[in-house]
Image (cartoon, rainbow, N blue to C red):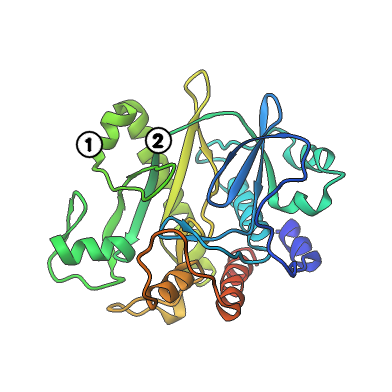
Amino acid sequence: MDFYCGFMKNFTLPKEPLMTIDDLPFKKVSKGKVRENFDLGDELLIVASDRISAFDVIMPNGVPGKGVLLTQISLWWFKQTEGIMQNHLAKNHDEKLRELLKDYPHLIDRSMIVRKLNPMPIEAIVRGYLAGSGWKEYKNTGKLFDFDLPAGMKESQILPEPLFTPTTKAAEGHDMPITNAQCAELLGSDTFEKIKSASLALYDFGRRTAKKCGVILADTKFEFGKDAEGNIYLIDEVLTPDSSRYWPADKYEVGRSQPSFDKQYVRDWLETLDWNKQAPGPVLPPDVVANTIKCYSTALELLMK
């Protein structure tokens, strides 16, 4: 908590979003929707930009400081969840990062040094409430993908128990839901069971922690990777507003969509437009950018106060 308080005291939002990272002397090996990865030999440097995506499309303009907030939230949760699942952070991470980027201090707070691992080809999604694509699926089929649910459930209603609903992980385009059986076939039954168990445990920890802070963790997604010996690690990001659906508990009401501390605000704004959800995305107006960063910073403040 001391680190968080010190970070927020010294953190000032940049005026312009950092959309790409081109000034480092390391080889860039990949570029995702938000993060860029650089080769350090035995490890990787991950730098979070201020890009924001919705419906798997990167918006033309970003949200200043978003990458810093996402990184700091992930680092906090990685440390909180070490007892549930080992993660990809390098040993002596903070000291090593400061030394590596001593000539690039503007990138330190948005960066992580991690082990080189083989990412799993799925996104491990856990849902505790009937919302988003899960609500749309239930309205159409009466089920939550391959799970039967009681009839007559309402939007945003808590599920009888948290459910593991994995998707494919697409390099481009939309991730697609798969059944637990398909996921087990893709990963192997032993790996599947370990990832499912870890995902449900991580969600439960996140849900209970958020509840103490007056926040509902409705659903989230995790990513995992393996080393050469087959050991499994939690990777990428964890329990951030980009990977999770956070709701203020005092405003929660079954039967409607909820106000949120995540990028659902951007999705909701996009849904008001005549846009086909294909690239290029529309430019986010200043008020949407400002309200988005407010959602992210509020989540950080509430969860880590």
Cα distance, mark 2 to mark 1?
15 Å
Q: Position of residue 204 (x, y in %)?
A: 42, 53
| Residue 289 in the figure: left or right of residue 243 | right
Question: At x 51% / y 55%, what residue is drawn?
Answer: 239
Find the residue positioned furthest to the front.
280
Q: Is residue 274 above or below residue 24?
A: below
- Residue at mark 1: 181
Give SS at disc 2. Answer: loop
Neighbour tally class for label 1: few under 14, some 14-19, many 20 plus, Cα within 10 Å: few
Q: Position of residue 105 (x, y in %)?
A: 83, 51
Question: At x 40% / y 60%, what residue is drawn?
Answer: 55
Q: Which callout, 2 or 1, points at the residue further toward the start of the chain?
A: 2
Closer to us: 194 or 241: 241
- Residue at mark 2: 121
Which amino acid is tagged 1? Answer: Ala
Give SS at disc 1. Answer: helix
Q: In the image, which disc is placed on residue 129?
A: none
Picture quadrant where residue 29 is located:
top right
